[in-house]
Amino acid sequence: MCDVCGDARHAPGRSRRGFLRAGAVATLAPWGLDLAVAADPPKPGSAPPQNAIAPADALKRLLDGNARYAANAPNERDFSAGRAARAQGQAPIAAILGCADSRIAPELAFDQQPGDLFVLRVAGNIVNKDLLASLEYGVQFLGVPLIMVLGHSSCGAVDAAIKVLKDRVTLPGHLPELIAAIKPSVAAQKGKSGDLLDNATAENVRRQVGRLKTAAPLIRKHYAAKKIDIVGGVYDIASGKVTML
């Protein structure tokens, strides 16, 4: 008798469905254990992975790279070099939660090469469950020591939230769901001086950083243990410079 469907014709224990089910369990098993799926510990005598560094060192590397980029003096790179090595795994030095804006490319803005950054992008650089899960993967299994939430000047998503609140604009499709996460940052600027778009953009970054610092269970645990740091910055499209918040 088949354990899955109860059909006597499927009596052999290794039915196709059973085989697939066993394969799925075997595939997912490491996720239920405290094991490094994609960043196994280095073998004895081998060099440690590039991301076996302090969060402050990872941040310095990013900011040094951004200074080179803004000065139009990036490191010369052969992007074909290292492909074989990268095929064996990844050890990114930072995870970047950035906006989907086409004018921003984190690898370029921080003058890093393929394999250095674990990049997640969504309009408005907001935290949702899917992106949070991806960040958890980067921290838990890739050993990422730093998370940066990266906003940017002239952000269309933040500007849309402003128009919704100030001008009562109605957005189509699923955009209202996206903008809902940004509206509190706009509302917080009521009565404050300065440029509304710039201030709301910075506030949105701060709020996403704050959310990540308390995001249970994995991110909060690693942050509380000081295994990672979580920071925020704003990229200026015109100058290419990142200002830390």
Image (cartoon, rainbow, N blue to C red):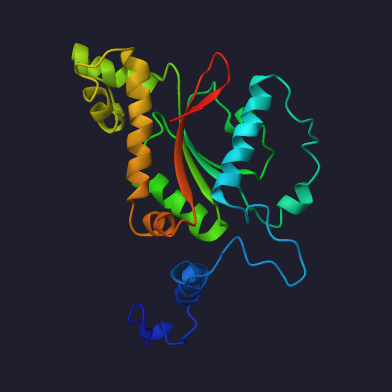
Corner quadrant of residue 238: top right
The residue located at (65%, 32%) in the rendering is 65
Percent across and percent down for residue 127 are 36, 41
Percent across and percent down for residue 215 are 34, 51
The vertical placement of 23 against 123, above or below, is: below
Tally the marks.
0
The residue located at (32%, 22%) in the rendering is 200
Percent across and percent down for residue 12 are 47, 87
Query: In this rendering, would 54 be left or right of 69?
Result: left
The residue located at (56%, 22%) in the rendering is 241
Corner quadrant of residue 188: top left
Give the camera-side residue of 51 and 134: 51
Give the camera-side residue of 28 and 74: 74
Corner quadrant of residue 37: bottom right
Percent across and percent down for residue 177 are 27, 33
From this viewpoint, is residue 127 visible? no
The residue located at (68%, 26%) in the rendering is 68
From this viewpoint, is residue 200 visible? yes
The vertical placement of 145 against 21, above or below, is: above
The vertical placement of 53 against 209, above or below, is: below
Query: In this rendering, would 217 be left or right of 59?
Result: left
Give the camera-side residue of 239 and 129: 239
Q: Quadrant of the N terminus?
A: bottom left
Q: Quadrant of the C terminus?
A: top left
